[in-house]
Amino acid sequence: MLCGVCERVLERYENEYPSEVCDKFFGHHRNSAAIHSAAVLGCYMCSKIWRTLSVIPLPLSEAEFFQKEDVRVRQEESTPRMKDNDQIATDEFYTYAQLLRGTWRDYDGDRPDDFRLWFQVGLEDGPNGYLGVGSFYLERLSEKESATRPVSMTPAVLGDTLSEAALEHAKGWLTECSQSHPMCNNTTSPVTWFPTRLLYINEIQHNQYHVRLINTAQERPSGRYVTLSHRWGELDYLRLTRDTFSLFSEAIPVFALTKTFQETISVTFRLGINYLWIDSLCIMQDKDDLSDWLREASVMDKVYLYSYCNISASVSLDGSQGLSRERDLAKLDLPTVRLLTRASGVDLEDHREVFELSDDRIWEYNVADSPINTRGWVFQERLLAPRVLHFSHDQLFWECRRRRACEVSPRSDVPLGGNLDTSLAKFRTYFQKHALTSISMSSTSMDPNVRDSKEAYEVWQDLIETYSGTNLTNPLDKLVALSGIAKLMSTFVQGTYIAGMWRENIERDLLWFKDVYSQEFAPKPSANLYRAPSWSWASRDGKIRFSGLQGDVLFAVRDVFVQHKTQDVTGHVISGWLEVVGELGPITLSYWKGYKSFEHRTVWKIDNNSWAQPKANFLFVPDEIITDAQNFDNDNLAGKLFFMPCLLDRSEDFPMYAMVLRIVDRDNGVFERIGMAVGLEDLGDGEIPPLPTDVGEHEKATFPCLKYEDGLHTVRII
């Protein structure tokens, strides 16, 4: 259903120019209290808008936010006050709607008869004066579709998310995928690999199960298996250890498991599957002996790649919250609206067309931004699994290599949302484009023409940018939780994997920097949490970005060494270094108030100010928050910081990137990376201003290095 205000927004629409894109503004609710009230009463659009309003970090405090509810609108339809130039005033709180013609969706063909409806909140000090709080899609129904569409869609989603009706949808998706999607079946039919251990499930009476742990080498499974993605949380629950192994082999006390595990066992059996893999029940969890965990972590890629389906407890913060959720069926029903879509001058009522209205952010809210998908391990699990069944807030969501669906839209692709899902979609597109007949770990399964390709490296960097924004309970898992994807990518690039990078593309892989726009910086991990050399993005917490520039590389990596904890070269790293050849120059960093809103940014100047022209400034982006300011200042003033130009691209506004290094061992030319320097201005006319490396030959020869030859320094970075 829709509230009266939402209905009036759409009823007032009249497209006088049917051949052109429509861009209309309409007033909406006068204040947040009205939105909340309409949401409680079941308005489809207002409930989605309130969902966003209740959680977004508004630029005003909560008290100020609600104090500003009373002004903005004077007309009954809640039309926002307009400025003299017909622009909407943005100095106080209000909501308004914008209706645009066209789809902007991933359909095979253009759908010019569909519409998108945006809702914004006007706020003082908001970005551009407003915040987006809702996006809806209006799909035109044909006369036949309109006539045959049921009055209500909710009978198809009766009960909670563990109901028979819900699981019937899941069974339908599984059947369709297993029978019609070749790309989703090349590792699961027939099953050729099994994890070391699995849970075998048998129903002893209705909804009561006998579960035991089996060793698949000794007891070969007779069917497919599913996996579980879940958040461990802080609960202390039953898990596999040396002490519980015998018990688990006989019968696991299901009543002693978490609600999430119990419900996953039930769902698995009800889907017609007898075998289940759960990390904490199938891998030894003894803290004093990690040998089993390390061994199983090295094959984690296969655990998910060869699974039939991955069950995701998408919105549960820990095992006590389970899979099931009650739901308000009225808020799930997709309303229909009638729009005037033809030119004026005729009886407009004869030209009202029926549109089905759906939440364009439904996937973003229920899947992409769900708690489970903030976990680093789950990033890999979702990408590798051929199918994922998401148990979300109020319905089931389906994801496979070919499509996405949900209970209220079981046959239509649900639109993507969020950076994480966009990144996964890019990988799947690349994967489907280049994979041949199987996804085995053999390099013979991939098209040899795409190995070492530029596209593969770009896909990898995109994955890393997204993965770096996820969270890990144990920071030491930074590379291990990505190892499965690295193994799969190695079949595309067939290169040497180096601490989260590829040797064949390492000069460009080194051009990463912290994303200061997405989150606050994190301090550098302590020495006892070493997980990668300083030059690897994996050595730092928080989201990173790559330069993405395609200009001239100004340095070269001559040699690489990485030592691993085990024989798995995609796993734990315990030491490593690079030998790099390039131009080296000393720098001094000084704080620039021009970027005061980003307190960890700095601009450097050379000591003698010979390179102090405004366009010669560089923005220093440190790799972590500087916690020991006094020590950093001492190093800065003592000449321990150096600069090595890495890439030049005259076509960009930020044309040069350089590594900022700190001396670790002056006598042996050993440095550590502490950040990146990014050029602030276009170089213009192809001229490069004097760099700190542009000093006399005699002075260059005195800089700390392994070797100085032909104006270039060879240094080691650890």
Image (tube, helix red, strand yellow):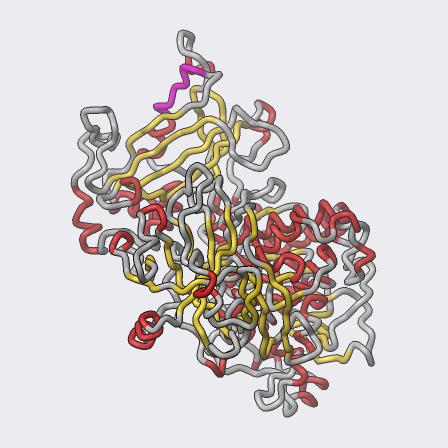
| Residue lying at 37% horizontally and 50% vertically, measured from the top left | 51
Q: Which quadrant of the view contains residue 496?
A: bottom right
| Residue lying at 20% horizontally and 44% vertically, measured from the top left | 69
- Percent x, y of residue 284: 64, 83
Q: Nearer the viewer, residue 76 or 712?
A: 712
Q: Is 581 situated left or right of 220 in this image?
A: left
| Residue lying at 47% horizontally and 57% vertically, measured from the top left | 658
- Percent x, y of residue 10: 38, 28
- Percent x, y of residue 472: 50, 70
* Residue 376 appearing in the image: no
Quadrant that contains the N terminus = top left
Is residue 347 one of those drawn in magenta? Answer: no
Q: Which quadrant of the view contains residue 98?
A: top left
85 shown above or below 622? above
Q: Is 64 situated left or right of 120 in this image?
A: left
- Percent x, y of residue 341: 45, 19
* Residue 85 appearing in the image: yes
Q: Nearer the viewer, residue 152 or 536?
A: 536
Tally of numbered tags: 0
SS majority, magenta: loop
Q: Which quadrant of the view contains residue 91?
A: top left
241 shown above or below 84? below
Q: Residue furthest top?
A: 345
95 shown above or below 366? above
| Residue lying at 46% horizontally and 46% vertically, measured from the top left | 655
Is residue 16 one of those drawn in magenta? Answer: yes
Query: What stretch of residues is rendered in magenta?
Result: 11-17
